Image (spheres, grey):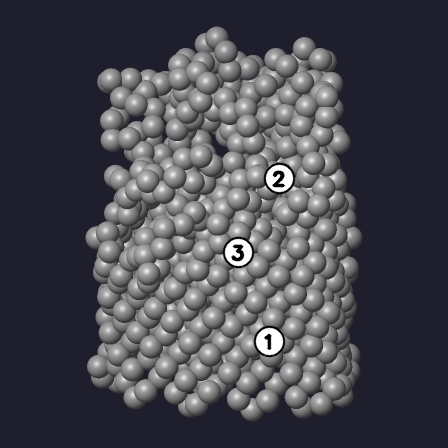
Amino acid sequence: MLYRSISFTAALVYSCAATATELPLITVTAEAEQAATALPDLGTTATVTRLDAQTVRTTAGPAANSPFRAIINAPSVNFQSADPHGLTEVGFHETLKIRGVGQSGPASARNIDGLPITGNPGGSKGILDMENVAAMAVYRGAAPVDKSLGFSNLPGKLDLITRAPQVDMATEFRSEGGSDDFRRVFLRQDFGQHGIASGFISGSWNSGDNWKGEGDFERQNLFTGLAFDGGAAWQMELYAGYNHDDRNNYQFFDYAKASDFDNYTRNWSTDPARVDYYDYNHQTFDDRFIYANVRTKLTNAVQLVFKPYYLNESGNYWFSSINSSDANKSRVLNWMIDHENMGMMTRLDWQFASNQTLQPGIWLHSQEPPGPPSTQQKYKATANGLVFDGWQVLADHDAHQLISPFINYLGQFDQFNIEAGLRFVNLQLGALTAYNATGTAATLTNADAARDAGGIDAIASADAKTFNEWLPYFGVTWTLNPTTRLFTRFGRSYGLDVNLFPYYYTQKSQFVSKGVTFQSLWDRLELETANNIDIGGRYQRDKWAIELTTFYAKHANKQSTIYDPAIAVRYPWNVADAERYGIELESNWQITPMWQVNGNYTWNHFTYSDDLALSATGNIATAGKQVVDTPEHMLKLGMRYTQAAWTLGVDGRYIGERYGDVLNDERVDAVTLFDANAQYQLTKSLNITLNILNLFDKEYIGPISAADDAIANYIAALNGVNGNGSSYQYGAPRTLYLGLVAQF
């Protein structure tokens, strides 16, 4: 598959060689390069931590395709994974939370060169090898108007900056292996600059076994880029790639089972006659993508920036739906996904004064579902294998569309850096057409044929729906003197979950009995918004620095799963308000030229403002309770030692106690984890690397599929769970990896 995609990718590159990627200026000191740590941006007008290329590659781990694992040591970042490589998903979404907020809707917290190329659900989370990332920026809370593009941006944004083609010819080769038969090979060839053009091509392959039970994973990636340098008049870059991801997923457990660590190595069954067979919990995705950037000078004071992008993804999620109250209702589901994301951002940079710039622009985006899901097949597990048993969901859905003009102002004065912007979001959810899945339709495995046979189910269908929202942003940094800076930022972020449809579809008889159409619920959906404010300061000396950020946010229309007494069913609704406030304390210290220490502490008080409806007779006392899967305390420390050919590093993370339910009854204990890494330079061009993850082999609970997550509750309802529906996975044990890196 990898090699068949070479011709496709090359064709994309050479047929579209009229575009490029804008790379923001990243200033990295020699000490920072050696330290491989995440550092705050000193002059920025946003709350952002920037990671250089070495930090990204070191922290991402040996698989080097999870950008979320690469930022695991950044302030306020809570990222959990059931595997050592950061590939785990919760509710078919990434497990990343920033300041306790996860990504909502069919979107990702991750952008690439400022563009929302990828989304959720699907396999596009790891379409870039981390060797092809020059830097990352982690925006916490609200982000500037042109840095927060996406279907939603509630948690902030993680922006990956693509590593551009090099001016000189160069080769990078990596080979790594280790625990659970892990193997990876990466090769990047830069061809150098010839005339105005330069380019590279890279490829990688990695595979391994799951650390417990049966199952494995395999990934193939091909990526290429071209750059054209027209001097001061214009510049262009173009990137295109292909990614294949194939893996078995780990089992989730309810709280009682997860709390008993005798189940730590327990996983799916090895009997294909059982619904919980390991290979019925499997995902396979192919992604083909291209993105670009053009920068051209219109006048001495005006520059045009144009960034188009396109992604096509196809694949399947297979998963066991195990009914806890009636085993005869248990099924294996096949979620069929084939969708496209496409769009463009264009912006004018008008430097109307030597220290001031105005940036009007517009972002256009089209995104095919899911979500919500439209085609899910059901299968019975038998002694002879899987037998088709109809459709769990049968629908069709128009693309979601976003139109978002914005304007941004940047000013640099003697003591002040100022950024002020305003973005308007016009978000149209595509029309949703449901189909009857009974009768002949239930016997047909082809979705189009089943739709034709079943006919439209009007009561479960809905027209397109439009949301409008204004997103202001303001940030200022005040330099009191060469050692002291004060700052404040304010901005609004937004999100939208689209999980109402599968609830309605699977409980349709109850809704219909009360005369409730899907359209009537669809019309009442609201955006979740959060108003964010940060205030803080930084003090820096020659060898050390300390920064304190205080933050506050008020969430309105936060989605939670409610009980509707008029219908006697539970479904997701934008009814909850929540409030969060806390501090982030960051520090780094260059003790000697060889020793460097860095760390950060986060306190995050994130609570529900209201009680939530649980039944026809009452509410549950959620007011004042910590939001699920949100540690109130996190502490992260890192140390680096560099001497001649040796570089040694240790990183420690304390993740405070968390809760898996809105009543805070299902408490997950705090955990302290350590990772270690070493590098030895054999020659100028050759290095040996060693990575040990979970150094002390700590057994702990990692990802939580939490009870205020609509997808978690949908899966629970599907499986006949009457309780809160939260489920849990264990984190990976100690793993060890040895690598060889050649650069010449």
Q: Give whichever of 37, 666 is nearer the camera.
A: 666
Q: What element carries label 2?
A: loop
Q: What's the residue type where badge 2 is placed?
A: Val
* Location of residue 103 with respect to 450 vertically, above or below: below
Q: What element carries label 1?
A: loop
Q: Residue at x 74, y 62 (%)?
A: 533
Which of marks 1 and 2 precedes in the sequence? 1
- 278 to 456, vertically: above or below: below
CA gap, disc 3 and disc 2: 17 Å
In the image, is residue 2 above or below residue 686? above
Q: Do the residues labelled 2 and 1 touch (CB within 8 Å)?
A: no
> On the rendered structure, is 689 left or right of 283?
left
Mark 3 or mark 1: whose residue is earlier in sequence: 1
Q: Where is residue 566 in the image (x, y as percent from the top left)?
A: 73, 18
- Using a 10 Å C-alpha cutoff, classify the residue at mark 1 as few (fewer than 14 neighbours), some (14 to 19) or many (20 or more): some
Residue under label 3, please give it: 656
Out of 281 and 8, give the one closest to the viewer. Answer: 281
Q: Mark 2 points at which residue?
A: 662
